[in-house]
Image (cartoon, helix red, strand yellow):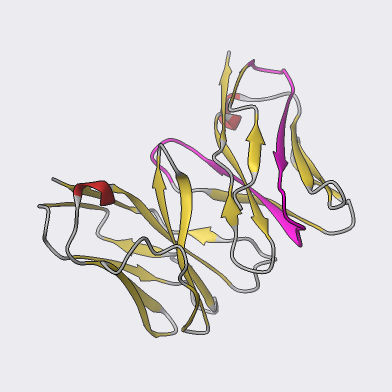
Amino acid sequence: QQPVQSPQAVILREGEDAVINCSSSKALYSVHWYRQKHGEAPVFLMILLKGGEQKGHEKISASFNEKKQQSSLYLTASQLSYSGTYFCGTEAGTALIFGKGTTLSVSS
Amino acid sequence: DAGVIQSPRHEVTEMGQEVTLRCKLISGHNSLFWYRQTMMRGLELLIYFNNNVPIDDSGMPEDRFSAKMPNASFSTLKIQPSEPRDSAVYFCASTRTGRDGYTFGSGTRLTVV
């Protein structure tokens, strides 16, 4: 079952914040977050495991609520380099299944 | 570490022709995944291997698609015969434990005309 991401697209100015959500109808073992720039491969950002922990990566952090089967990615004080498509990947005992992505555009 | 290496980067072929996509894993990684990306469907899992053994091929669209992993470092994805609807970017990815995240290759952009 493919996870559902929202919103589909976000437009920001440099310095603004954004939240990207990912939800699944299945119980999850973990949630991965990836960023893909146009014409390139997806790049791993972080993994969230059961336990509701929040992880950080520079000014990008994420949380995982396994009871609600949801994860959120937080982008703080966005930079131009944050532009791209963000995918969540959910694992329910097999390989990652990816959401359709959220396109983030950051302008100066 | 050269990363996950895919070849070719681009492939244009005529409908009905056989296409073979290749992937070299990162040394020490024991899981290999083939994904297909299109605008309509996003990133779709086609098949994955663990220690050279196919674990889940439920995402392979039909019998025209086949994948092999003859050794621990190399995999192929074959489409025979190819059709225009197979046009997409095909990625392979590998991981050591899964908890390290997946490392994707640069992808093969396939166009079937």
Residue A108 located left or right of residue B5: right
Q: Is residue B3 visible?
A: no
- Spot occupied by residue A53 in the image (x, y as percentages of width and height): 88, 51
Q: Tell me residue A30's x, y (percent).
A: 74, 58
Residue B113 on image: x %, y %:
13, 45
At a point 48% along the width and 84% down the height, the residue shown is B53
Picture quadrant of residue B76 = bottom left
Q: Is residue B91 above or below residue B66?
A: above
Residue in front for this viewpoint, B22 or B39: B39
Q: Residue at x 69, y 63 (%)?
A: A92
Residue B80 as seen in the image, left or right of residue A81: left
Horizontally, is A14 left or right of B23 in the view?
right
B47, A57: nearer the viewer? B47
Q: Examine the image and state in which quarter residue B73 appears.
A: bottom left
Residue at position x 19%, y 58% from top?
Answer: B82
- Residue A60 on image: x %, y %: 73, 37
From which residue to which does the magenta span run? A12-40
